[in-house]
Amino acid sequence: MRKMNEMELSVALRAMKWAWFYTVLFLFVWTVYGYIKHEDFNSPAFFLLITQNLIYLVISKFLKWKLNENEK
């Protein structure tokens, strides 16, 4: 399997960002709908929405920290 060139990598990253945005938006709407209909946040959509964003934040902070450590 060959490595992606810069343009292919850029396209792949943009597609992943839009897919992530769609997932977050869908889970948010599903959570709000569930809250309005059942008046609680106890749903798989809410759990996925929160944990997905927590994982994203933790990993991005870790990778930025790791990058800064390697630059020193």
Image: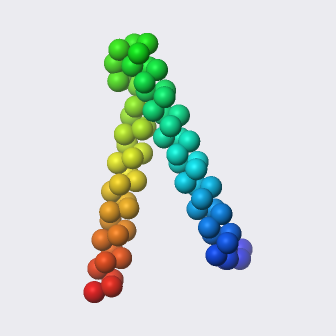
Q: Is residue 18 above or below residue 4?
A: above
Q: How many marks overall?
A: 0
- Residue 38 image position (x, y, % from top left): 39, 13
Q: Residue furthest right?
A: 1
Instruction: Say whether residue 56 is left or right of residue 30.
Output: left
Image coords of residue 7 (percent x, y): 67, 72
Residue displayed at 38% across by 51% down: 55
Asked which quadrant contains residue 32, the reply is top left
Residue found at x 39% / y 34%: 47
Determine if residue 33 is in view: yes
* Scheme by which the image is coloured: rainbow
Q: Is residue 72 above or below residue 30?
A: below
Q: Quadrant of the N terminus?
A: bottom right
Residue at x 68%, y 69% (from the top left corner): 8
Question: 52 left or right of 66?
Answer: right
Is 46 positioned to the left or the right of 68 in the image?
right
Quarter of the figure with the C terminus? bottom left
In the image, residue 34 above or below residue 47: above
**Residue 44 visible at all:** no
Furthest-bottom residue in this view: 72
Point out residue 61 in the picture as x, y percentages from the top left corner.
Answer: 32, 63
Q: Quadrant of residue 37?
A: top left
Residue 66 spot, x, y in % from top left: 33, 74
